[in-house]
Amino acid sequence: MFGFSDETYIDVASGNGGNGCVSFRREKYIPKGGPDGGDGGRGGDVVFVVRDNLRTLAHLKQIRSFKAENGKNGMGARCFGRDGKDVEIPVPPGTVVKDARTGEIIKDLTGETRWVFLSGGRGGQGNWHFRTSTRQTPRFAQPGERGVEMRVGVELLVIADIGFVGFPNAGKSSLLNNLTNARTKVAGYPFTTKIPQLGMFRYDDHDIVLADIPGIIEGASQGAGMGFKFLRHISRTVGLAFFIDLADERYLTAYETLSEELRSYAPELLEKSQVIIATKLDEVDGPAHLEKLRESLEGHVVIGLSNITGEGLDSVKQAFIHLVSTAENPVDDGFTTVVDTEAEYREEP
């Protein structure tokens, strides 16, 4: 079984066009049949096909080269050569194609199902096309056009509505399991998810995609831990959910530390809508730490949550619904329940 793979490089080439044919009509009762060379076939294209059943780029780690078929040469009697077959490269939703040399994005395949990247070479014309009143026996034909070869980077960016950001063991995976059908690993000892996990949270007729991004540590934006590897996966989210562990001694500084890592990596990430989820409310000092956290983060929405007892879970759901709906419809979000202040997120006593 292959592991998670979100970036690789491949060599691709479209097919060469077939050559035109030099031929003359030779039949018993037609001594001056004239030129009848057919055209060469067109070379095959390089096509990226987005497949919903794919989640990683692991299959591209095994096959690194993709070449379309060449077009066939033309034949006599004005017979055209067969077109070359396209080569299809299956990729998961959220894939980005980049120039391997410059790193420049060539195409973002979000919303695409099929995209022709490199077109095949045009087939050459047979000598039939070059006959004139003064040149009745052209003994030449046009060669096929060559295909294009290129090395590209293929990168997967997880597509989600809300990205979970937090230190390892902050309760992100537990909430994902509680709200969706995802079954990520959770345990009573410190560890971190090693790959991004997606889950679908359904509310009435609305689907909200949640992404558990592997735990970020201090220095992640400079490459420490796995945070740098997966920070780019939150670039497409509508909003961010910051997870702060109330049982962690760093609970009062965690938000600023996480924000600084995002700011160092890409400042625009902090412009996204946010909600702060304070987890492990069931711990002995949980309620007291929650109040201190709210005081230190005045002006931010801070929701207390216990993944074990379920306290605060409804408030989290409402916050996610409001975050996504207001982003999609900033004037009228279409929901009957709209939460605008921090107090409205809190559980009733």
Image (cartoon, rainbow, N blue to C red):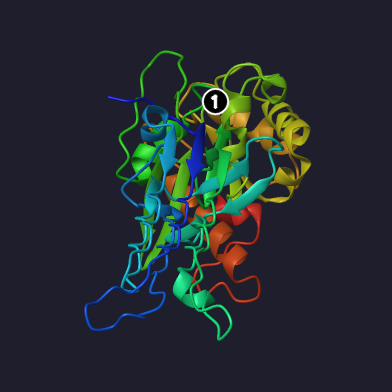
- Give amino acid for label 1: Gly
> In the rendered image of this protein, does residue 339 appear above or below residue 270?
below
The reply to whether residue 241 is visible in this rendering is: no
Q: Residue at x 49, y 31 (%)?
A: 281
Badge 1, how many Cα within 10 Å: few under 14, some, many 20+?
many
Q: Residue at x 51, y 70 (%)?
A: 138
Q: Which of these two is toward me, 70 or 177?
A: 70
Assign the N terminus to one quadrant of the image: top left
Residue 185 x %, y %: 34, 25
> In the rendered image of this protein, does residue 188 appear above or below residue 125?
above
Q: Secondary structure at mark 1?
A: loop
Residue 104 x %, y %: 70, 44
Q: Residue at x 77, y 31 (%)?
A: 264
Q: Is residue 92 left or right of residue 241?
A: left
Marks counted in the figure total: 1
Q: Which of these two is toward me, 330 or 313?
A: 330
The residue indicated by pointer 1 is 215
Residue 66 x %, y %: 42, 40
Q: Residue at x 35, y 41 (%)?
A: 178
Q: Which of these two is toward me, 57 or 82?
A: 82
User: Seen from this angle, which residue lies furthest bottom?
Assistant: 133
State the image quarter where residue 114 is shown: bottom left
